[in-house]
Amino acid sequence: MRARVNPEQCIACGVCVDTCPEVFSLESDVAEAIDGDIPDELVEATKEAAENCPVDAIELSD
Ligand code: SF4
């Protein structure tokens, strides 16, 4: 699974970073997800971050 943050939607609230700091970071005015496949042990936390994002800016794909 891969994750991407849509920069047009992200409001930089930090929820995804709080939920899964191994995958998401917030070093500019929008969050970013790591490149490439999410490690298996982080998939659930990544999905939780996507569900918790208040503006649905996190896109998950296979
Ligand atoms: Fe951006 Fe959503 Fe992460 Fe908040 S939870 S920083 S809006 S991607």
Image (tube, rainbow, N blue to C red):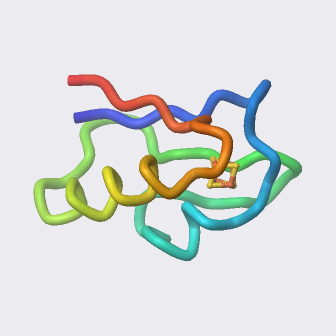
Q: What residue do we see at 46% from left, 29% from top?
A: 59
Q: Position of residue 61 (x, y in %)?
A: 30, 24
Q: What residue do we see at 67% from left, 41% from top?
A: 55
30 left or right, relative to 33: right
Q: What residue do we see at 62% from left, 60% from top?
A: 25
Q: Position of residue 42 (x, y in %)?
A: 24, 62
The image quarter in which residue 40 lies? bottom left
Q: Nearer the viewer, residue 8 or 25?
A: 8
> Compared to 12, does 56 lie above or below?
above
Which residue lies most toward the right here? Answer: 29
Which residue lies most toward the left here? Answer: 40
In the rendered image, which quarter contains the N terminus?
A: top left
58 left or right, relative to 36: right
In the rendered image, which quarter contains the C terminus?
A: top left
Q: Position of residue 43 (x, y in %)?
A: 21, 54
Q: Nearer the viewer, residue 21 or 49?
A: 49
> Compared to 21, does 31 lie above or below?
above
